[in-house]
């Protein structure tokens, strides 16, 4: 519990570091760039802007992740305006960054979860991969399925009579997206963590065990 609470304190300290603010700003810009591109599969529209937010949460924690989520939503609306600006959706975007920060920040310390290959006897730390799965599933369930669906219903974007069908459709869509999103996160987050440590000459750890 102490370690969990300390992550908020450590994350808040990141706001005082030029390095953290600079890298965060870069990834917010990357998120805006990605936001402008999406893949329309007819049954699902894929957008990977959340990956930049996930990286920010992993590197700088829940506090920075939350503020970055807010910033991305506000700047995203200014860059790609569509419809009315509703502050409640900004808070939901902040919560997304908060989720990744809670699940991924400071997880390079302590005991890792090892996967042992019985044939070769070699072990691999899979802690980061498991935490990525948890973070993305929480993002999908809390943000995409529960909050966004409820808000869309509240504001009339989804008719009351179509709510059940919307849940089914969104669930199917998000399951498809999970199959695509998770491999990307498995590849990009360890790369981002390793690159960050090398560029800023931080203590090197196994990215897979972050």
Image (cartoon, rainbow, N blue to C red):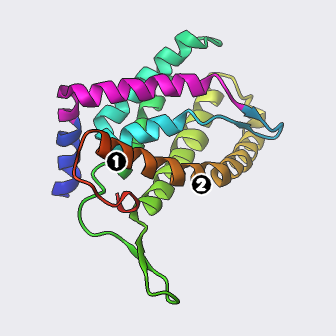
Q: Could you tell me which residue is drawn at 51 percent across and 28 percent down?
A: 31
Residue 86's tag is none
Residue 122 percent across, percent down from the top left = 43, 81
Q: Main secondary structure of the magenta part?
A: helix
* Label 2 packing within 10 angstroms: few (<14), some (14-19), many (20+): few
Local SS, label 1: helix
**In the visual, does 134 lie left or right of 13?**
right
Kindly report the distance in space between the C-alpha atoms of the residues bearing marks 1 and 2.
20 Å
Q: Position of residue 201 (x, y in %)?
A: 23, 44
Out of 195 and 91, give the one closest to the viewer.
Answer: 195
The stretch of residues the image draws in magenta is: 12-38
Instruction: State the residue at coordinates (22%, 52%).
Output: 203
Answer left or right for 179 relative to 123. Answer: right
Tell me which label, 1 or 2, sits earlier in the chain.
1
Which residue, given by chain and number where applicable, does mark 2 sit on?
183
Q: Is residue 13 magenta?
A: yes
Judge whether residue 207 can be spotted in this image. Answer: yes
Packing grade of label 1 (10 A; few <14, some 14-19, many >=20) is: many
The image's mark for residue 102 is: 1
Res 56 → quadrant: top left
| Visible residue check, residue 90 | no
Secondary element at image label 2 = helix
Find residue 10 and report its horizontal and vertical position in percent: 18, 41
The quadrant of the rendering that contains the C terminus is: bottom left
């Amino acid at each position: 519990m102490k370690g969990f609470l300390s992550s908020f304190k450590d994350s808040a300290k990141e706001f005082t570091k030029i390095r953290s603010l600079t890298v965060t700003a870069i990834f917010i810009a990357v998120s805006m760039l990605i936001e402008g591109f999406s893949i329309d599969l007819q049954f699902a529209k894929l957008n990977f802007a959340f990956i930049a937010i996930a990286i920010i949460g992993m590197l700088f924690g829940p506090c920075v992740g939350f503020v970055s989520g807010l910033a991305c939503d506000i700047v995203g609306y200014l860059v790609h305006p569509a419809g009315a600006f509703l502050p409640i959706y900004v808070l939901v975007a902040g919560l997304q960054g908060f989720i990744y920060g809670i699940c991924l920040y400071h997880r390079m310390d302590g005991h890792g979860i090892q996967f042992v290959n019985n044939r070769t006897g070699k072990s691999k730390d899979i802690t980061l991969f498991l935490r990525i799965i948890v973070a993305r599933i929480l993002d999908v369930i809390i943000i995409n399925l529960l909050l966004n669906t409820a808000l869309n219903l509240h504001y009339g974007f989804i008719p009351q009579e179509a709510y059940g069908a919307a849940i089914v459709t969104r669930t199917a869509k998000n399951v498809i997206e999970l199959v695509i999103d998770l491999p990307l996160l498995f590849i990009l987050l360890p790369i981002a963590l390793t690159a960050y440590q090398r560029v800023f000459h931080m203590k090197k750890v196994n990215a897979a065990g972050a």
